[in-house]
Image (spheres, grey):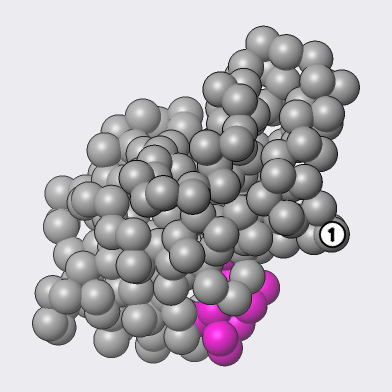
Amino acid sequence: MRVILAEDSTLLREGLVRLLVEEGHEVVAAVGDAVTLMKEVEEQTPDMVVVDIRMPPTHTDDGLRAALEIRKRCPDIGLLVLSQHVERNYAAQLLASNAERIGYLLKDRVAQIEEFLDALERIHAGGAAIDPEVVRQLVIRTTHGDPLARLTPRERSVLEALAQGHTNTAIAQKLHISLSSVEKNLNTIFDKLDLSHTTGYSRRILAVLRYLES
């Protein structure tokens, strides 16, 4: 795939460039600020953009705002957003409109090369890739009346795997259960969360994450 990298840490940026090139991808641009990122996206029209949330010029949420603008202008471009820490509000903004071709990973996950590359492939294929730690913090609820309290431990495990962007088959392999068991658990989960009428793989992920964040 044709990739643009936007990361202000030169060491991490160059490391990712080398990794992607070695894996057979074409890095059409590697930039260190959000303004240059937008210019390169307009000129290059890549398949995928990997962008850090906090970047110059303000070092706040410039990367996130650039990602949201890219999604608005070019919805077919895959987006993988990187963050140093779990930032729930940023995750919610990123996933607010569509969970197709989208990813949110912590930078620590990038060091786990196979997981990073798998996330890119899932996003490029039209799916989602949400960091397990992000999902864990979204799933943990302390308020009374939490609908997740109605889920069994197995259903919660299936829900977390689903929210990470895994397919039913991948969930079965990850949890060492049968595919039919995954499907049964998913049906029960969406019934309990009043999401049973939501259709579509990515739309179900979005519905779950919206519900958890609300």
Seen in the picture, residue 165 relative to 214 is either above or below; the reply is above
Q: Which residues are magenta?
A: 70-78
Residue 77 magenta: yes
**Whole-percent x and y of residue 119?**
53, 43
Quadrant of the snapshot with the N terminus: bottom right
Q: Residue furthest top?
A: 176
Residue drawn where x is 80% and y is 20% of the image: 181
**Whole-percent x and y of residue 92?**
44, 66
- For mark 1, what is the residue? 197
Residue 63 visible at all: yes
Answer with left or right where residue 59 lies relative to residue 153: left
Residue drawn where x is 63% and y is 70% of the image: 98
- Please tell me how crowded label 1 is: few (under 14), some (14-19), or many (20+) other residues with Cα within 10 Å: few
Answer with left or right where residue 98 lies relative to residue 183: left
Residue 115 magenta: no
Tag 1 secondary structure: loop
